[in-house]
Image (cartoon, grey):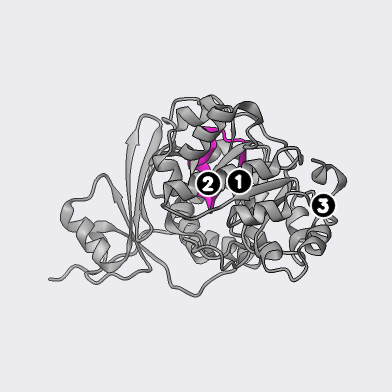
Amino acid sequence: MTRQPVPAAADAALHAEVLARHAATFGANETPWRAWRLPDAPATLGAADVLLLDGEADGAALDRVAAAGATLIETDREGGQWIDTVRSPMGTWVFGGAADGDTPHSPAFVAVLLACLSLHFPAHDALCLARAWRSGTLDWPDEFARFPRVRHAALVAPEARAEPFPPCPQRLGLYAVLPNADWIERVAQLGIPTLQLRFKSDDPNAVREQIARAARAVRGTGSRLFINDHWRAALDYHAEHGPGSGIDGIHLGQEDLDEADLPALRKSGLWLGVSTHGYAEMLRVAPLRPSYLALGAIFPTTTKVMPTAPQGLGRFHAYTRLMRGQVPSLVGIGGVNADNLPQVLAEGVGSAAVVRAITEASDVPAAVEGLLALFPGDAVAV
């Protein structure tokens, strides 16, 4: 006789209450997310199925889940911690968090996990939220200590404490992200507090030339200059020209972090800024103790292919509440312009990054002046 699939036990009332409380903030989809213990799952799986397993899955199970585009959460107990491995179409994450009971996938955990998936959070972020959720409340989690630690791919060993990168100003003010040194030279005298050179090229000679021009352009202006991605060339230039090189920091994305020489970056004395796009990425970066954390993308943007949908102001508010005590300097990123900049700053961040609001302006000096005027006085001083 064919075994009938049996859904994992979930607290239906809690699931409904979480959605009712938070759908207006985060938005909710109509996907009928389903959770199953792996042995009780249906033969045919889909992208909205979450499989739960106590222990490690075999190769056949992994292949089956991957082929269906489903999600698998494998959980082991290690001392007083749950070790969760989340496998989804967005990759594999491993987390370690305090075990607050004897059941790795309690009905409350399953209810919150499925609710967070319905609130548009990817599986690895939904897992973090379900583990951080405090029993007996519907309040959104914002206690950093309750969130799990990233074990794979960790930037800092789970039990280690990294030396912090040099602190940058808490209020970086208007942060212009510009595609080449031509733009840096064009706006360097306009009083923008923070500039970033985001020059996309694999030509090492072109990269070195762009960095040198950008660094020369900002010297004596009071503007801070970050170099995106090309950290090695930036370190070489800074080492050659000393503290007055014109380069103040490096900005890296998640993929860049995997290849960067983090000890060398820390030794350089330059600031380090890092982009994040959700809970798992924030938890991964926090132990690195960077100079600032960029949170987003808040609004739709065409300047970069994003791994996640626009986060919206609801998520941005939740992220800033969680991370303010961990990385004091926070930057809002993604689709920021003169119309929505006041909403971003209202969340208490000291900086917001803009791209098209400057590069596509018909009158660049006037656009910069208008953007600067939206910041409080202490955020625009350079």
Please name the residue shown 63% across and 36% down the image. 248
Foreground mark, 3 or 1? 1
Spatial CA distance of label 2 from label 3 is 33 Å
The amino acid type, in three-letter code, at marker 3 is Phe
Instruction: Looking at the image, tell me whether mark 3 or mark 1 is earlier in sequence order.
Output: 1
Label 3 secondary element: loop
Spatial CA distance of label 3 from label 1 is 28 Å
The residue beneath circle 3 is 375
Please name the residue shown 78% across and 59% down the image. 368
Q: Nearer the viewer, residue 134 or 62?
A: 62
The amino acid type, in three-letter code, at marker 1 is Arg
Q: Nearer the viewer, residue 36 or 167?
A: 167
Instruction: Looking at the image, tell me whether mark 2 or mark 3 is earlier in sequence order.
Output: 2
- Residue 307 screen position, x and y as percent: 46, 60
Task: Give, as a single range, the part of the protein colored magenta.
Answer: 276-293
- Residue 263 screen position, x and y as percent: 46, 27
Label 1 secondary element: helix
